[in-house]
C-alpha cells in the first residue's frame, strides 16, 4: 500500500466527507516509506490563495443548451477566445472562480508535515486543496507556495 491517511491509518471510503469546518474527514498521503524515497521539491508547509487571473476576453451568459449540459459543473459564464487562440475556443467560469478574481493575496493555509512531504515527493499527487479563508477545496492553480510565485502542485 503506497497511501494512507494523514496522521496514519488506512484510507477509508468516506475520507472525502466534509466536516463542519469544510475540511475533509481525512486526507490521503503517501506512506512514510514512500516519502522516504526522496523529495523532488522543497518541503513547504504553507500556501496562499491568490485566486484566478481575470478573464482576458468578454464574458457572456451560457446558452440554453450549455446551461443544460454544464449547470451541474457550476458554470455560469463563458469566455470566448479570439480565433488567434485556436484550437482553444474559450473557458467556462464558475461563480466561485469569478468571485476570486482580483482578490490578490488571500489567506495562507498551513498543512501537516505528511501532506507537505507528499507534495515534495510527488508535486502532482493532489488536484485541489483546502483554503482556510474560503473554507472549501479549490483547484491548485489558485494557490502559490507562501513567499513564492510558484503554483502549488507544479
Ligand atoms: Zn481562499
Image (tube, helix red, strand yellow):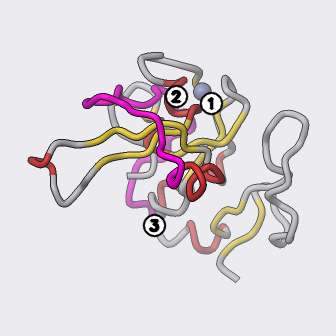
Q: Residue furthest left?
A: 84
Q: Is mark 1 within 8 Å of ligand 1?
A: yes
Q: Are the two marked residues, 2 and 1, in contact with CB atoms closer than 8 angstroms?
A: yes
Q: Nearer the viewer, residue 53 or 62?
A: 62
Mark 2: is the Cβ under 8 angstroms from ligand 1? yes
Q: Quadrant of residue 52?
A: top left
Does 1 appear above or below 36? below
Q: Which residues are magenta?
A: 39-66
Tell me the distance, in whole angstroms, between the alpha carbons under discs 3 and 2.
Answer: 27 Å
Q: Quadrant of ligand 1?
A: top right
Q: Which residue is mark 1?
A: 109
- Picture coordinates of residue 136, whole percent (x, y): 70, 37
The disc, 3 or 1, on the residue closer to the chain's N-terminal end is 3
The residue located at (57%, 38%) in the rendering is 45
Q: Is residue 19 magenta?
A: no
The residue that mark 2 highlights is 49
- Main SS of residues in magenta: loop
Asked whether residue 47 is drawn in magenta, I would say: yes
Amino acid at each position: 500500500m503506497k497511501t494512507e491517511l494523514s496522521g496514519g491509518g488506512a484510507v477509508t471510503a468516506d475520507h472525502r466527507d466534509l466536516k463542519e469546518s469544510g475540511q475533509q474527514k481525512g486526507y490521503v498521503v503517501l506512506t512514510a516509506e514512500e516519502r522516504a524515497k526522496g523529495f523532488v521539491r522543497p518541503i513547504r508547509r504553507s500556501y496562499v490563495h491568490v485566486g484566478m487571473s481575470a478573464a482576458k476576453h468578454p464574458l457572456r451568459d451560457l446558452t440554453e443548451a450549455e446551461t443544460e449540459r454544464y449547470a451541474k459543473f457550476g458554470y455560469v459564464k463563458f469566455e470566448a477566445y479570439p480565433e488567434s487562440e485556436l484550437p482553444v475556443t474559450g473557458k467556462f467560469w464558475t461563480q466561485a472562480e469569478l468571485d476570486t478574481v482580483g482578490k490578490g493575496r488571500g489567506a495562507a493555509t498551513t498543512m501537516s508535515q505528511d501532506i507537505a512531504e507528499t507534495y515534495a515527493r510527488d508535486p502532482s499527487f493532489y488536484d485541489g486543496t483546502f483554503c482556510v479563508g474560503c473554507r472549501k477545496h479549490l483547484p491548485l492553480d489558485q494557490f502559490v507556495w507562501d513567499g513564492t510565485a510558484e503554483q502549488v502542485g507544479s
